[in-house]
Amino acid sequence: MREYVAFLNSAREMEGFDFEKIEKWWVARVKDFFIGKPFKIKMDLSKSVRTLVRGVLSQAERRQKDAGGTAYVGAVMQHLVGAKLELFLDEALEHNGFSVADAPTKRNGDFQIENVVIHVTQTPTESLIQKCVDNLSSNLSPLIVTSHKGAISAENLADAENIADRIDVLEIEQFIATNILEISRFARESRKVTVEQLVEKYNAIIAAHETDPSLSLIIG
């Protein structure tokens, strides 16, 4: 490092030397390094379960911003919900990579359990509400799992289509936290085991359906 700094200092006299460009290059390399790291879920039993979930999603939001729009948040949300469903139902479900669209695979949504179709999204859109309309036409019950802001948007969009009273909209933090508490029977020590099981299932889904290992989770 000393040699490199000495080189930079001496190189200032070289033609075409652009220190700002070099600095930006190193900043980009640092971001690449952290983008390649797994997300961390902090096992602090003094905090609420919602806080644990929020912490993971906050990391995904920061990484998404640094990565120039790569949809880390949506991918993490989809696979967290998938892992939670498998843990709660105690059965394997069909999973797809985040970038796999519904139409080519003829899916009604991200997950379907009995007649309930689950759509997981960070930002609900009119096209998603149209999918919900199609679900209802097929005698299916749509459920949207989204962010806090997304829940407000989904309800407004659903109201515009006159289906607000026919679909369920839940915030993802609450959706996951409720089941973790129920599965652990509200016991603090059991909660730790349940979170570990959730992370294990989540990582298995990432390994099987995504090409980016940095989407995985580690417990810290």
Image: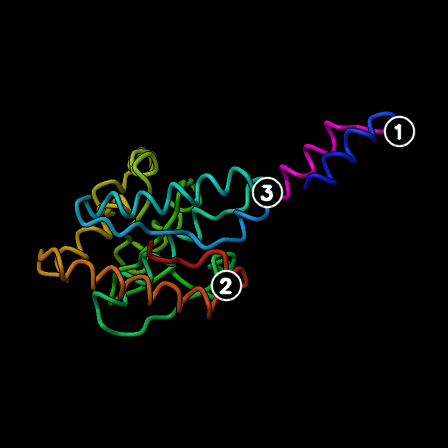
Q: Amino acid at mark 3?
A: Val
- Badge 3 density bin: few <14, some 14–19, many ≥20, Cα 10 Å: few
Q: How many marks?
A: 3
User: Most prominent secondary structure in the magenta stretch?
Assistant: helix
Of 198 and 1, nearer the camera is 1
Picture coordinates of residue 34, whole percent (x, y): 52, 47
Q: Amino acid at mark 1?
A: Met
Picture coordinates of residue 168, whole percent (x, y): 23, 47
Magenta span covers which residues?
Answer: 16-30
- Badge 2 density bin: few <14, some 14–19, many ≥20, Cα 10 Å: some
Q: Quadrant of residue 47?
A: top left
Mark 1–mark 3 distance (CA, rounded to whole Å)? 26 Å
Q: Quick check: 169 above or below 83?
A: above
Mark 2–mark 3 distance (CA, rounded to whole Å)? 23 Å
Q: Which numbered disc covers residue 14?
A: 1
Q: Which numbered disc covers residue 158?
A: none
Q: Earlier in the sequence, mark 2 or mark 3?
A: 3
Magenta stretch: includes residue 22: yes
Magenta stretch: includes residue 183: no
Of 220 and 198, nearer the camera is 220
- Badge 1 density bin: few <14, some 14–19, many ≥20, Cα 10 Å: few
